[in-house]
Image (cartoon, rainbow, N blue to C red):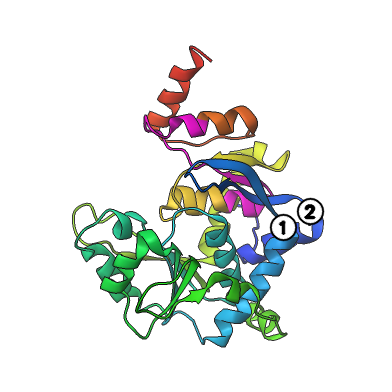
Amino acid sequence: LQPHARRMTDRFLHWVEAAPDRTFIARREKLADGSTGAWIHITYRQAMDAGRAIGQALLDRGLGPDRPVAILCENGLEHALLAIGCLMVGVPYCPVSPAYSTVSQDYDKLRHVLGTLTPGLVLVPDVERYSRAVLATVPADVEVVAVNGTIEGRATTPWQALLDTQPTPAVEAAMDKTGPDTITKFLFTSGSTKLPKAVVNTHGMWCANQQQMRQSMPVLTEEPPVLVDWLPWNHTFGGNHNVGLVIYNGGTLYIDDGKPTPALMGETLRNLREIAPTVYFNVPTGFEAIAHAMKSD
C-alpha cells in the first residue's frame, strides 16, 4: 500500500484549496407535490464554510465520542454537511437506517441503536415522517434538530440554527487534535439475525481503504470522479466506499432519489440521462433494470 492521507479532512481541505468552486454534492429540489425539480449544487468551498459553522455548533454542545451525532435521515444535502462538520471537529456521527424510523412500528432497532450510541444530538429531515419515532425513542434530554418543521410537545432546533453559528478558532484547534485513530463514524450492522452492532470507523481506516481503491482502480486518479448514486449512507458501500471515493479524489456526488424498484427506477433513469457518471455503482438488480431499459431507450 502506497502512502495515504492521515485524515479524510486532509483530502477534503485539499480539494477546497485546489477546486473550491467544483460541485461537491448535489440533489434535486423536492417539490411540494412530492416530485423532484432542478439540481441544487453545493461546492467544496460552500461545504467547508457550512462545516465550520456546524462544527462550532457541535463544539458548543460539548459533543464527542460519548455523545455523538445520530443522523436519522436518508441521503441528503443536510446529512452530508453535518457529516463534514463532524469530521472537521472530531465528533463521531452515525447514519441510522431511515427504515428504523419510517417503516418499523415498534422502533425496537432504533431504540437499541440510540441506546448504544447515547447521542447528544439527533438530526431528522422532517417531522411529518419522523416525529412518532422521535417521541417514542429519543430521550427528553437529547437535542433534536429538524430540517423542516417542529415536533409538538418536544423542543426542536431548526437546522438553520446550526448553519448560522459563528465559527471561532476553536474549530481549527479541534481539527488539529484529530488524527488517524480519531473515530469518524459508527456504522451499524444490518441486524438481520440479531440486533445491529456498532462498528467503529476511524480516519486511518477510511483513508487506507480509499488508497487501496486508487491503486486498484487507477481511473480514479485520471479525472475527478462523478457519481450518480442512491446507495444508502448507513451502509459501508454507499457511505464509506462511494462518499469516501468522492471526498478522497475531489469528485462530485449527485444524489439519486431513485432506486431499483418499479416505482422509483424512472427517477434513476432520468438522472442518468442528464448526468454522465465517470464510474457507476449499483446492486445487481439495479444494473439489470438499467440494462432492460436500454432495450427501448
In the rendered image of this protein, does residue 227 appear above or below residue 286? Answer: below
Left or right of residue 149, residue 7 in this image: right
Give how far across and how far down residue 251 sits, in percent: 67, 47
Image quadrant containing the C terminus: top right
Residue in the image at 57% along x and 45% along y: 213
Give how far across and how far down residue 157 sits, in percent: 50, 77
Which image quadrant is residue 277 in? top right
In the rendered image of this protein, does residue 282 appear above or below residue 157? Answer: above
Give how far across and how far down residue 235 sits, in percent: 41, 52
- In the rendered structure, are the residues bearing label 1 and label 2 in contact, judged by CB atoms less than 8 Å apart? yes
Left or right of residue 271, residue 197 in this image: left
First reached walking from the N terminus: tag 1 or tag 2: 2
| Residue 117 visible somewhere in the drawing | yes
Foreground pick, 3 / 61: 61
Please rate how many residues cluster around mark 1, counting C-alpha atoms within 10 Å: few if below 14, some from 14 to 19, many from 20: many
In the rendered image of this protein, does residue 13 appear above or below residue 261? Answer: below
| Residue 181 visible somewhere in the drawing | no
Left or right of residue 243, residue 112 in this image: left
Residue in the image at 55% along x and 65% along y: 83
Give how far across and how far down residue 143 sits, in percent: 43, 80
Residue 130, disc: none
Residue 44, disc: 1
Q: Is residue 256 magenta?
A: yes
Foreground pick, 25 / 130: 130
Q: Is residue 169 magenta?
A: no
Q: Which residue is mark 2?
A: 21
Residue at the limit of the structure toward the top, as seen here: 295
Residues drawn in magenta: 244-268
User: What's the residue type where badge 2 is placed?
Assistant: Asp
Which image quadrant is residue 200 in? bottom left
Please rate how many residues cluster around mark 2, counting C-alpha atoms within 10 Å: few if below 14, some from 14 to 19, many from 20: some
Between the C-alphas of marks 1 and 2, the distance is 6 Å
